[in-house]
Image: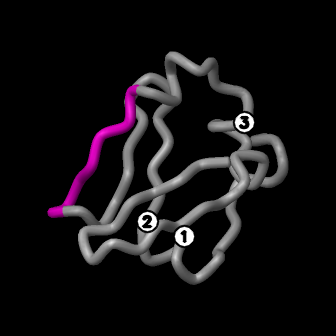
Amino acid sequence: MMHVSLMDGRIISVPITWFLLLREATPEQREQCEIGGGGISLHWPDIDEDLSVANLMAGVVRHLHSRP
């Protein structure tokens, strides 16, 4: 599970399996998360993955299938 703590105290928890690149990343690569856009996005430079906090809150799932 990935847990994202918001500034208002809420915690969003989503399965890492929802996101192919995060699922296949090493624990060390997953730890290299950067917060962008004043807190509206998450970026993992080592695996070139970007997620929107708004999409996580809405339960939007991306990257369930492998890339072409």
User: Which of the two labelled residues, at mark 1 and mark 3, occupies the earlier sequence position?
Assistant: 3
Under mark 3, the amino acid is Arg
Q: Name the residue carrying label 2.
A: 52
Residue 20 on the magenta segment: no
Instruction: Judge whether 52 appears above or below 18 on screen.
Output: below
Please state the horizontal and vertical placement of residue 45, each as a whole percent of the image. Answer: 38, 30
Q: Name the residue carrying label 1.
A: 56
User: Which of the two labelled residues, at mark 3 and mark 2, occupies the earlier sequence position?
Assistant: 3
Q: Is 36 on the left or on the right of 46, as rendered?
A: left
The furthest residue to the right: 65
Depth-wise, is mark 2 or mark 1 nearer the camera?
1
Q: CA distance from mark 1 to mark 3?
A: 16 Å
Q: Which residues are magenta?
A: 32-38
Q: Name the residue carrying label 3.
A: 23
- The secondary structure type at the circle numbered 1 is helix
Circle 3/circle 2 CB separation < 8 Å: no
The residue sitting at 65% across, 77% down in the picture is 59
Under mark 2, the amino acid is Ser
Under mark 1, the amino acid is Leu
